[in-house]
Amino acid sequence: MRHPVVRRAGPRPSARTSRISHARRFAPASGHGYHERVVVLFTLVASHRNVDLNTVARLSTGVDALPHALVTHGSLEGLVTLSTCNRLELYADAPSRPGAVDECVDALVAQISRSTGLDAGFVADSLELHREEDAAAHLFTVVSGLESAVVGEREITGQVRRALIDAQEASAASGELIRLFESAARTARAVGTQTSLGERGRSIVSVALDLAEDVAPARWDASRALVFGTGAYAGATMAALAERGCADVHVYSGSGRAREFTDKRGGSPVEREELGRAMRESDIIIGCSGGSAPIAAGTLPEGPRVVVDLALTRDFDPSVADLDGVELITLESVRLAAPEETDESVEAARRIVDRAAADFATHRSERSVDTAIVALRRHTMAILDSEMEKVRGQYGCGAQADQLEFAMRRMMHSLLHTPMVKARKLAAAGREEEFFSAIEALYDLQVEAPEEPREQPAPSRGSLAAGYPAAQTPAEEPDDELCRRPRAS
C-alpha cells in the first residue's frame, strides 16, 4: 500500500537536482552486451529537528535487517544506515527508472514497520526525503556538526565513519555511496580546519555534565559517579569525568563487559548483585547503554543525586524525576541548553558545505560525460577501423595505407576535440543532458556506465578515519550501544 505522506524536505527538486542523467549508461542502441543499471541517490531522515526523540528511538529499533534484506534481495543498489542518539538516516541509491525511488521508499517504510510493529503510515509520516544533490548536502551538513543538537560537536564524524564501515562489512555500500561518504569526510575535515566551528569542544556529554554540575550535591572531586554502558558515549563520559576531576567512577554493564571496559579506561566494575548499593552510594548516575527496559522509579533510591540519561531509548523511566532529591537530565535537556555557535563560524561552515555539495554534483555529472565521451570515441574509431580494413583489402598494407590511417586518426581526434570540451562545460553547468540527447540523436547511442562491484572490501577503521577529524571522535569501540542503535548494555 502506498503511503505518500513521506515528507519531501525543502522545495521541489530543480531541473538539475531531479535529473538522473549522472548515472545513465552509454551503449549502442542495437545493443552490444550492455545493460541498463542506473542510480539515484536519496536519503530518508528522522531526527531531533523533525520528530521527537522517542519517535527516533522507536524507528531505530527496526533498522538492523535493512541492508541485507533490501540490497541483497531488493531493488536498492546500496544502503548506509546512520543511527545515533538523536537521528536515524538511511542513505541509499535506487534505479533511475520512473517510480523506482518511491518503490524503494515504500520498501524501506514497510520493512521498518514490520520490524518495529509501528503503523506504516506513522513511519512514513516521520521521515523526510532528500534526493540527489539535496541528499549529499544534507549528509555534508550533518557530518560537519551543523545539524547536531550541540551545533559544532565533532562526535558525529566518528558516527558517520562507522556507518559506512558497517555498510561495507555487510556488503551493502555501493560505489556511489562510498564516494558520497568519502566526500563527506573531506567536507568535515575542511570545516574542522577552516572554521572555528566546534573549537570549544562542546558535545552532548560535555553539555550534559555542565548541567549536572549546576545541580550536583557535591563538587566533582568529591563525587562518586556510576556509568551505565560500555560503548562510545560511555567512553566519552569517562574521559569527561576525568577532565572534571571526578576520580571515583564505577561502571555497570548488563552484558557483563564492565570489567574489560574499566581495565582499559579506569574506574571500577559493578556486578549485577552490587548495582543497588552502587546506585545508593552514587552522587551522579549516567545512563549510556540504551538498554531494552528503563530503570523504574521504584528501583532507583531517592536523592540527593543527579541522574543523566543520554540513552536514546532511555535508561531511566521519566518518573524518576518525581523522586525526592533526584534531578533528571535528558537528551532533550541537553538540546535545549546547548550553547549556540557564533553566526560567523556557522555561516563559514555552511559555505564550505554548499561548495562541497555543488562540487559533488558536478563531479558526478562529469563522470557520466566522461563515459559518454569514451563511448563516442569508441564509436567513431570503430567506424574508422572498419573503413581502414576496406582500404587494406583493396590496396594492401603498405606504407601508403599506414600514412592514410595516421592522417585519418589525427582528423578524428581533431573532429572530436570540440565536442569533448563542450561536453565537459555542459556537465559543469548541469546541462549534460543536452550532450546525451545530441549524441543519441546523431549517433544512435545510449548511455552505459562501467559496471561497479557492489561489494567492496571494508577498510580498516583506522584507515578510513583519516578522512575525518579523528582526534575529536569520542571512542573507537565498535560496540556503541548508545549512538548507533538500541541494544542491551
Image: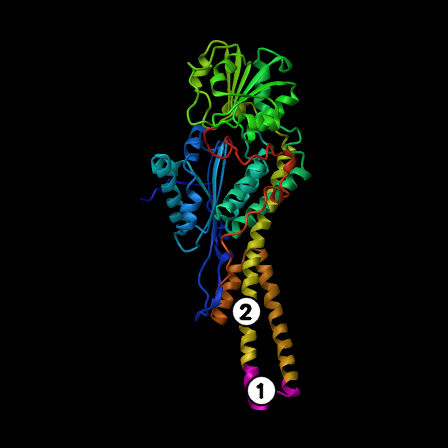
Residue 138 painted magenta: no
Of 415 and 91, the residue lying toward us: 91
In the rendered image of this protein, does residue 237 appear above or below residue 326?
below
Q: What percent of the width, then of the height, locates residue 295?
A: 44, 20
* Any part of residue 150 in sight: yes
In the rendered image of this protein, does residue 387 appear above or below residue 252?
below
Q: What percent of the width, then of the height, locates residue 111?
A: 37, 41
Label 2: which residue? Answer: 376
What is the quadrant of the N terminus in the image? Answer: top left
The crowding category of the residue bearing disc 2, from other C-alpha atoms within 10 Å (few below 14, some 14 to 19, many at least 20), is many
Looking at the rendered structure, the kind of residue marked 1 is Arg
**At 45% from the left edge and 11% from the top edge, which residue is drawn?**
323
**At 59% from the left edge and 19% from the top edge, which residue is drawn?**
249
How many angstroms separate mark 2 from mark 1 (CA)? 24 Å
Number of the label disc, if any, that sits on residue 45: none
Q: What percent of the width, then of the height, locates residue 416?
A: 60, 70
Looking at the rendered structure, the kind of residue marked 2 is Leu
In the rendered image of this protein, does residue 396 appear above or below residue 171?
below
Q: Is residue 263 left or right of residue 69?
A: right
Of 369 and 234, the residue lying toward us: 234
Q: Secondary structure at mark 1?
A: helix
Magenta: predominant secondary structure element?
Answer: helix
Of 423 and 328, the residue lying toward us: 328
Q: What percent of the width, then of the height, locates residue 206?
A: 60, 24
The answer to whether the residues at label 2 and label 1 have Cβ atoms under 8 Å apart is no
Q: Secondary structure at mark 2?
A: helix
* Magenta segment: 387-401
| Coloring basis for residues | rainbow
Label 1: which residue? Answer: 392
Locate residue 146: give its quadrant. Answer: top right
Q: How many marks?
A: 2
- Lower position in the chain sequence, tag 2 or tag 1: 2
